[in-house]
Image (cartoon, rainbow, N blue to C red):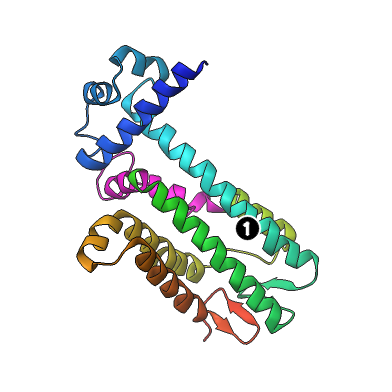
């Protein structure tokens, strides 16, 4: 594929993101995408069989990158700390060898979340589409859940497999999934989707707004700490 063709395909994808996020997936026609991208409908159908395949391509690209970011963190921190004897996973907690190890993990977790946040902000057009689709009775309504590995198939995702192979006590408890969705994933998605509107309403600049959100993540994360451990489910 030559550079001209690559450029045309990228323009189709960029135009689709803009139109899907502004008008909605169902309300956007292939004709509008072609007009916005400056290509013919025939060229769109050369690359994509349908409008649905365009969205599938956007989601897959996002999924691949999110998985890559997650796996980098898992290998460099969780797996490595287990191998070094600094971390032991039990059914209800991450148990660290020392408070220094707990702090080390939390700080790296904070850096990881910053990376995810920056990536999400860069791709907020696509995430906005998935957010709106999740509110409708359409075939795309669960794409956001698949992206965040919050479906029943989540135990088949590479992150789960990698951690469970390093320590077979690891599992997704109901409490962990609930906390992950409603206190980390969903706030992140909402923040990204309404970022520009909230920035205007609050009068904060990009640096202030991002720092405020990250500080909230630090506060929420600290609620999971019990001594040297990080809880994976409610402690009764």
Whether residue 188 sits left or right of residue 63 in the image: it is left
Q: Is residue 205 above or below residue 119?
A: below
Which secondary structure lies at badge 1? Answer: helix
* Pointer 1 local density, CA inside 10 Å: few below 14, some 14–19, many at least 20: some
The image position of residue 48, as x and y in percent, is 39, 21
Report the residue at 59% width, 73% height from top.
Answer: 106
Q: Is residue 198 above or below residue 21?
A: below
Whether residue 13 sits left or right of residue 110 in the image: it is left
Q: What residue did someone put label 1 on?
A: 73
Q: Is residue 139 above or below residue 164?
A: above
Q: Would you say residue 128 sits in the magenta stretch?
A: yes
The image position of residue 210, as x and y in percent, is 39, 65
The image position of residue 196, as x and y in percent, is 27, 56
The image position of residue 72, as x and y in percent, is 64, 53
Query: Closest to the observer: 106 or 138?
Result: 106
Q: Would you say residue 26 sits in the magenta stretch?
A: no
Report the residue at 22% width, 61% height from top.
Answer: 200
Which range is magenta?
126-154
């Amino acid at each position: 594929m030559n550079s001209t063709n690559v450029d045309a395909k990228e323009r189709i994808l960029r135009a689709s993101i803009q139109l899907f996020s502004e008008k909605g997936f169902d309300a956007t026609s292939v004709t509008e995408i072609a007009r916005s991208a400056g290509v013919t409908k025939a060229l769109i159908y050369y690359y994509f069989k349908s409008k649905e395949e365009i969205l599938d391509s956007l989601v897959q690209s996002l999924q691949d990158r999110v998985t890559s970011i997650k796996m980098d963190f898992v290998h460099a921190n969780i797996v490595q700390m287990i191998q070094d004897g600094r971390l032991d996973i039990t059914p209800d907690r991450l148990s660290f060898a020392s408070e220094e190890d707990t702090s080390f993990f939390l700080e790296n977790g904070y850096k990881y979340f910053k990376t995810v946040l920056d990536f999400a902000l860069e791709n907020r057009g696509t995430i906005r589409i998935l957010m709106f689709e999740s509110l409708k009775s359409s075939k795309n309504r669960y794409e956001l859940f698949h992206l965040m590995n919050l479906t029943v198939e989540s135990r088949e995702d590479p992150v789960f497999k990698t951690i469970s192979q390093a320590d077979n006590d690891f599992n997704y408890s109901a409490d962990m999934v609930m906390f992950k969705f409603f206190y980390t994933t969903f706030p992140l998605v909402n923040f990204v989707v309404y970022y520009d509107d909230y920035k205007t309403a609050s009068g904060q600049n990009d640096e202030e707004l991002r720092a405020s959100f990250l500080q909230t993540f630090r506060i929420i994360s600290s609620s999971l700490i019990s001594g040297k451990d990080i809880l994976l489910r409610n402690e009764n």
